[in-house]
């Protein structure tokens, strides 16, 4: 591991710990059900700051990071539905298209299976419908 890479990882860990303390110092009472409703979509420039530039300034942009996160959450299956909906909202705000999100979810069928893909597509479609209806 190079020194620059080790420094980047250390910065990522420190930033992540700081963000977690800000959200909930104990994290013992965190309820994921409905989490997507209590944490609204961040503006694109804030997501770029947190996800695109803070962790790895020369790395991935926020849209790509969020698409990768959608992939991971898809493979986790139904247990990650609130997090998936939240990430889909953020990805749309960061410039991802509905088609790109659907393609990422479809690709994950090979890793998480068809039921996980179907559940993720249903969650994404619910977010797409909310966005069209103007629901926050």
Image (spheres, helix red, strand yellow):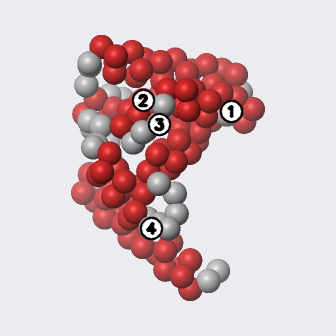
Residue wearing tag 3 = 96
Residue wearing tag 2 = 85
Q: Residues within 10 Å of mark 4 (few under 14, many from 20)?
A: few
Q: Earlier in the sequence, mark 3 or mark 2?
A: 2
Q: CA distance from mark 2 to mark 1?
A: 18 Å
Q: Is residue 69 left or right of residue 27?
A: right
Quarter containing the C terminus: top left
Q: Which element is circle 4 on?
A: loop
Q: Which element is circle 3 on?
A: loop
Q: Is residue 30 left or right of residue 59?
A: left
Residue wearing tag 1 = 107
Q: CA distance from mark 4 to mark 2?
A: 26 Å
Quadrant position of residue 48: bottom left
Q: Position of residue 95 (x, y in %)?
A: 42, 39
Residue wearing tag 4 = 57
Does the image show residue 112?
A: no
Front disc: 4 or 1: 4
Q: Which element is circle 2 on?
A: helix
């Amino acid at each position: 591991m190079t020194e620059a890479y080790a420094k980047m990882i250390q910065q990522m860990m420190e930033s992540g710990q700081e963000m977690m303390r800000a959200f909930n110092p104990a994290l013992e009472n965190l309820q994921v059900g409905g989490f997507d409703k209590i944490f609204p979509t961040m503006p694109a420039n804030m997501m770029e700051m947190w996800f695109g530039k803070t962790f790895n300034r020369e790395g991935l942009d926020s849209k790509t990071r969020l698409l990768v996160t959608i992939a991971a959450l898809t493979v986790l299956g139904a247990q990650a539905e609130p997090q998936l909906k939240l990430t889909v909202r953020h990805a749309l705000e960061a410039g991802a298209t509905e088609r790109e999100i659907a393609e990422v979810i479809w690709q994950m069928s090979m890793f998480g299976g068809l039921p996980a893909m179907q559940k993720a597509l249903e969650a994404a479609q619910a977010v797409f419908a909310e966005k069209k209806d103007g629901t926050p």
